[in-house]
Image (spheres, rainbow, N blue to C red):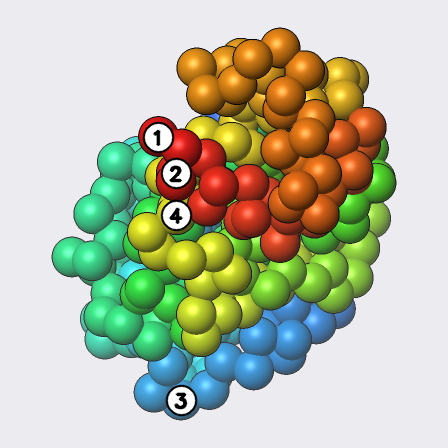
């Protein structure tokens, strides 16, 4: 048994707690993976880090050892108390017992922070949208998540995984899957593989700020009918402006193939649709 695995199990026994399935609690126990994660982030002395779901503090400790100042958010009271005891007197670590989804992140870190976390599988998407909401705070985001979600984030047009999540994050971030992590690297081992993902904020959004509301509406509407052609998927949304069948000509005038399905349109094409929809509204 590795030292880190033994440490995690010892902590759980001492706290007399068991990983909660309803919270998708699963703790990193592979020291080589931990080093690979930390090395990938490039975290260094003086960096400000927001850690999502600090758990037993295995990653927290390594980040602080690298010289970073860490705000460790942990929802579970038992683990939050453990973290407070473990890092008592360590000026580099601040423990916040809270639900990440309820936090005002602007009160916890200043701009140019790094966000790092091993995300609970059942709330990965809400956490991503919370990070999206506070995107201006982060110079980079580094997340361990279910491999299937990572594939959705980085999917290309025409891929079955391409959808609302891909496009919503793609407006603001460049997403890249760095490597996969086997289930055995965690305790308890999940039923699926994980992936380590980097989200790099873009200098400017890929959609014009004034078109963002229209973009979100068009994308959401299209993927509610993802099996339909794009002209049919958007017919209800554009209905007030067109007679039946005219939307095909409208899309063609925008340079689009009206026979494509929603998952086949690029972010740029959705941006064009959003601008056109706003002009009609």
Work out how far the residue at label 1 is from the one at label 4, CA to CA, in angstroms.
12 Å
Q: Which residue is mark 4?
A: 211
For the point 43% across and 70% down, the residue is 204
Viewer-nearest of labels 3 and 4? 4
Q: Nearer the viewer, residue 110 or 258?
A: 258
Say if mark 1 contacts mark 2, CB within 8 Å: yes
Mark 1 or mark 3: name the one nearer the start of the chain. Answer: 3
Q: How many marks?
A: 4
Viewer-nearest of labels 2 and 3? 2
Q: Which residue is mark 3?
A: 45
For the point 60% across and 64% down, the residue is 174
Q: Which mark is residue 160?
A: none
Quarter of the rendering occupied by the C terminus: top left
Mark 2 or mark 3: name the one nearer the start of the chain. Answer: 3
Work out how far the residue at label 1 is from the one at label 2, CA to CA, in angstroms.
5 Å
Say if mark 1 contacts mark 3, CB within 8 Å: no
Q: Which residue is mark 2?
A: 278
Mark 2 or mark 4: name the one nearer the start of the chain. Answer: 4
Viewer-nearest of labels 2 and 4? 2
């Amino acid at each position: 048994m590795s030292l880190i695995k033994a440490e995690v199990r010892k902590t759980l026994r001492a706290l007399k707690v068991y990983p909660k399935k309803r919270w998708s609690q699963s703790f990193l126990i592979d020291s080589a993976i931990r080093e690979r994660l930390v090395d990938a982030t490039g975290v260094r002395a003086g960096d400000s880090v927001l850690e999502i779901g600090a758990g037993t503090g295995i990653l927290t400790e390594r980040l602080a050892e690298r010289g970073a100042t860490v705000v460790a958010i942990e929802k579970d009271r038992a683990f939050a108390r453990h973290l407070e005891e473990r890092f008592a007197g360590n000026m580099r670590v601040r423990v916040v017992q809270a639900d990440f989804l309820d936090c005002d992140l602007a009160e916890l870190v200043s701009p140019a922070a790094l966000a790092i976390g091993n995300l609970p599988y059942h709330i990965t998407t809400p956490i991503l949208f919370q990070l999206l909401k506070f995107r201006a705070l982060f110079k980079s985001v580094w997340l361990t998540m279910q491999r299937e979600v990572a594939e959705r984030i980085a999917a290309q047009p025409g891929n079955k995984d391409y959808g609302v999540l891909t496009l919503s994050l793609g407006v603001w971030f460049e997403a890249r899957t760095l490597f996969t992590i086997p289930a055995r690297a965690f305790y308890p081992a999940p039923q699926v593989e994980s992936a380590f993902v980097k989200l790099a904020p873009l200098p400017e959004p890929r959609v014009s700020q004034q078109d963002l509301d229209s973009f979100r509406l068009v994308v959401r509407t299209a993927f509610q009918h993802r099996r339909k052609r794009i002209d049919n998927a958007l017919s209800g949304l554009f209905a007030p402006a067109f007679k039946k069948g005219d939307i095909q000509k409208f899309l063609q005038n925008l340079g689009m193939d009206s026979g494509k399905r929603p998952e086949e349109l690029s972010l740029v094409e959705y941006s064009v649709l959003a601008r056109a929809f706003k002009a009609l509204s």
